[in-house]
Image (cartoon, rainbow, N blue to C red):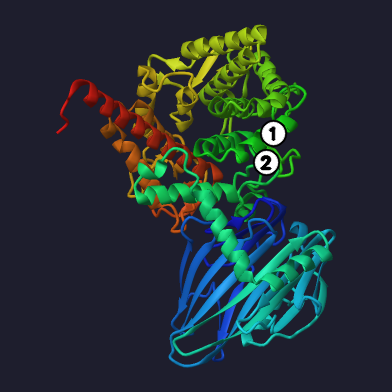
Amino acid sequence: MPRDIPVGNGNLLVTFDAQYQLRDIYFPFVGMEDHTAGNACRFGVWADGRFRWTDDEDWDRKLRYSHETMSTDVHLSNDELKLRLACRDLVDFDRNIYFKEITVEDTSGKDREVRLFHHFDCHLFGNDVGDSAYYDPRSRGIVHFKGRRYFLLGGRSPDGASLASFAIGKKETGTQVGTWRDAEDGALSRNPVAQGSIDTVAELDVKVPAFGSAIATFWIAAGQNYDEVRLLDQLVRDRGALSFLKRTEDYWRLWANKDESSISKVLPDDLCHHYKTSCLIIRTQTDERGAIIAANDSDVLRFNRDTYSYMWPRDGALAAAAMDLAGYVEIPRRLYALCGELITREGYLHHKYDPDGSVGSSWLAWSTPEGRLQLPIQEDETALPVWALWMHYDRLRDLEFIRPLYRKLVRSAADFMTSYREPHTKLPASSIDLWEERSGIHAFTVGSVWAGLTAAYKFADAFGQHDLAERYRTASDEIKAAALEHLWDSGRGRFVRTITVLPDGTLTKDPTIDISLAGVWLYGMLAPDDERVVATMRAIESALWVNTAIGGLARYENDPYFRDSALPKTVPGNPWFIGTLWLAEHHIACAKRAEDLEPARKILEWCVARALPSGVMPEQLDPRTGEPLSVSPLTWSHAAFVTAAQRYARKMNELRSQLTDRIARTGEVIG
């Protein structure tokens, strides 16, 4: 189930599903230590002897973000209860406190007593062993703890009262389903303490006048000891929850409107809104210490017992580059600095990392079937952070920031990429493709390594190390020449995605059409209007466009990942946002007139139409229904949208400026 509306501040991340159930609480790292382990923390309402959780079928739900801010705008209505709820959820931008404000509105025409129930399904540190919770009379809230992780669930009714009641008990043991069942009669047991596998429920009581409304607020303070969460709770009680809600919404609105390229003057309102939402969603997936996480959707855990809550250096670099384009320079700087700390002594970056910078789980082998050492890497993950760092420096010329990274990141990576070559072709040596499915020499990797070495050459030249610059430039030139010789297939009239070099130097080619072939031009190795690139991109669009009502580009021919076996063979795979947006980028890069940008604009509009109502974009879509597949939101999808939107706006401004200059110079009349 997709995560419709994540909210966070870089230390505390909270996610919800489509039924408005809180599903993940990550702290103190974004994506690391999911203190619910993806289990539903329910939200329920009792009125006139009837009870409903928000996942019950008789709710009408609308889940969105409030305009240009990292605050939810959720509307729930229930004809049986004759109630409407307007909810906003946010994490304070500065303090580690999650808030849920609920405006309860009566539609029955009579005064009502309404009880609101907030459930917390404890899995502190990601498991349910040894959790503890107790009612705390000092804070008048429920304290949950294990080791150095504390969460205090508190609240306030419209009349200023704290929790009206509470229940703390066992779950998932024997016949005990969970303490949340205790709420369904509208009266909680007030059991004050439990330990082991536990969950808790807090209650707020609200008096709602006929056809009127009233506001109540729950909050969860997160910290590493009792005093920390107690202080946060006291701050909310002293200042009032509203002050935290208002200041945080104001902060994110200011943040979302940092517009260095006048993008709002070029994009239509719906695209501009989606662009800003995408920037905000990328921010929710970014840890304060630098890691940009691929996706924090724990439901994928149920499929393969692992998640996407890792930093892939490639995904992180592309997201950082997107945020650089958008003017959010602090996010990229932290990512680049982190990569400088993580790079190995040999000069490469590992497959993926945990949010705290430790090496993540991996299924890439360290040895060949014969027992020889092979590096379990995707070499584009070493190359693209260097490429992105140069793009950052080229725009800002912030030499003091770059100086410490030049030796430990740029030179280390460049020395590795220069030497890690296949001897027969001089191409980058065999590594794993960006889809993590096959070993070989891949077009995407080749384009990325060329870009990384070219960036390193420019850095070395700027730092006056001309011998090094020449070494890196020579290596990048050799790689480009070898790519044109070995990856170009004249018989097919396009590039191939992968070649394999046998021990005797013989080459085999994998001609599968794959959106990753865009790597030969995306990072500058070839011009986008090079006739070989144009032919390849035409082949991609022809072979991979999903000819259903949903549309979009599949990843590659006969892609099996999350594919429904009932799909006809005429459907190449599920549509992916990333590849579809790469097609848009090609249209943008090749445009000579404003009208040439029309296909790219239509793709941007396709993304908006295929996103969830909240603006969240998943990794891929069901080609028949358009429903999200795999993880959601995928940070890379949003980064690809931000990048394409920025390049669209910049190209439109460039073409308009050229037209204006031409008219001024020639007196040409456009009609």
Secondary structure type for disc 2: loop
Above or below — where is 517 with respect to 415? below
Q: Residue 40 at x, y = what percent?
A: 63, 66
| x 80%, y 62%: residue | 228
Query: Residue 551: in sight, yes or no?
Result: no
Q: Amino acid at mark 1?
A: Ala
Q: Nearer the viewer, residue 306 or 227?
A: 227
Q: Nearer the viewer, residue 86 or 251?
A: 251
Above or below — where is 50 with respect to 198? below
Q: Which mark is residue 337?
A: 1
Callouts 1 and 2 close, C-beta under 8 Å: yes
Mark 2 is surrounded, within 10 Å at the Cα level, by few (under 14), some (14 to 19) or many (20 or more) other residues, namely: many
Secondary structure type for disc 1: helix
| x 75%, y 76%: residue | 141
Q: Residue 454 at x, y = what percent?
A: 57, 17
- Which numbered disc flags the more N-terminal residue, 1 or 2? 2
Q: Residue 306 at x, y = what percent?
A: 67, 48
Above or below — where is 574 with respect to 381? below
Circle 2 is placed at which residue position? 290
Q: Amino acid at mark 2?
A: Gly
In which quadrant of the rendered view does residue 446 lie? top right
Left or right? Give the position of 213 relative to 37. left
Above or below — where is 53 with respect to 488? below
Residue placed furthest toward the bottom: 110
Q: Nearer the viewer, residue 431 or 19?
A: 19
- For the C terminus, give its image quadrant: top left
Mark 1 is surrounded, within 10 Å at the Cα level, by few (under 14), some (14 to 19) or many (20 or more) other residues, namely: many
Left or right? Give the position of 65 relative to 25. left
CA gap, disc 1 to disc 2? Answer: 7 Å
| x 43%, y 50%: residue | 274
Q: Residue 402 at x, y = what percent?
A: 66, 26
Left or right? Give the position of 527 relative to 327. left
